[in-house]
Image: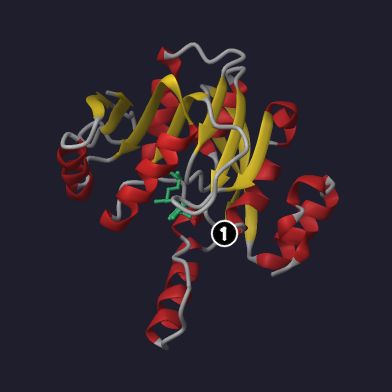
Amino acid sequence: MNDSLRNLPSLSYDELIELANSSFPWHWEPSVVADRSTRMAVASDPDGMLLEACQRQDAGEEGVIDPFWATTWRAATGLDKYLDQLNLKDQQVLEVGCGTGHVGFSAAMRGAQVTLTDGVYDPLILVHLSTWSVRDRCKVERLRFGVDTLSKKDFPFIFGSDVTYLRQLWPELLECLEHHLAPEGEVYLSDPFRIISTEFSEWIKNTSWIYSEFSIDLPDDPAHPIRIMKLTRG
Ligand SMILES: C[S@@+](CC[C@H](N)C(=O)[O-])C[C@H]1O[C@@H](n2cnc3c(N)ncnc32)[C@H](O)[C@@H]1O
């Protein structure tokens, strides 16, 4: 693996731009985050990247990770909107499976100290760029569910948007939450009411976690709201 990826936090802004340019097509996209107009660094061809990953998998290559990070999912916009209801000022926040980092960026813009994480390095290059203006409140690290642990492990808030889409991820995701959540902490996961996440909501009721859910409307498509799933320790 490219050493630059392991050393992302030590790279300058120009070095990050250079690394992004040499990794995949990307661009700045005007975005609304935490109710404010800003811009985010996003992959320019998420469909092409997914197709390429599928072709490599079909050709028998092992360990190819689907680049689902390359799209910003509506679930992230919904969770960003829900954060209006939490007081995050000076709170320690962990975002898991951050992808483009929309939710963690929102938490940082709301005054939280945020650790944005994903299981793969590529999105973290763009997350560093997107959060550059609030970098004093952001750490960006790789965190694979069920594999890695951070040295810090008592986050009062953990957020994850669209991270319940694969059944095999659930036990590893819970392990990650269990390890990093403070005793009285709260986890908020979001999804666009996918059938698989409804199964997750049923499955988790058979664990020790206490589950509740809410719905958030988004103006782009009010007929398809976003589900916010709140988990606390039982
Ligand atoms: C559907 S995307 C959602 C991305 C982002 N949260 C959003 O809503 O735009 C799922 C994310 O989970 C990450 N992911 C998948 N498996 C993971 C694992 N085992 N550990 C950590 N992250 C993982 C992917 O890399 C991807 O960024």
Q: Is mark 1 within 8 Å of ligand 1?
A: no
Is residue 32 something one can see in this rendering? no
> In x, y percent, where is residue 74?
37, 40
As helix, strand or loop, the secondary structure at mark 1 comes to loop
Given residues 233 and 217, the one toward you in this image is: 233
Residue at position x 73%, y 36% from top? Answer: 132
Which of the image's four quarters has the N terminus? bottom right
Mark 1 crowdedness (10 Å alpha carbons): few <14, some 14-19, many ≥20:
some
Given residues 187 and 132, the one toward you in this image is: 187
- 180 to 212, vertically: above or below: below
> In x, y percent, where is residue 183?
43, 21
- 156 to 66, vertically: above or below: above
Tell whether 137 sits left or right of 191. right
Q: Quadrant of residue 200?
A: top left
Residue at position x 53%, y 26% from top? Answer: 154
> In x, y percent, where is residue 68?
44, 58
Tell whether 175 sits left or right of 63. left
**Colour scheme of the picture:** secondary structure
Is residue 52 something one can see in this rendering? yes
- 15 to 81, vertically: above or below: below
Q: Return the residue found at the far bottom.
A: 59
> In x, y percent, where is residue 130?
66, 40
Residue at position x 20%, y 38% from top? Answer: 201
Residue at position x 40%, y 39% from top? Answer: 161
Which of the image's four quarters has the C terminus? top left
| Kind of residue at badge 1 | Ser
What residue sits right under mark 1 in the picture?
Answer: 44
Q: Quadrant of residue 160?
A: top left
Q: How many marks?
A: 1
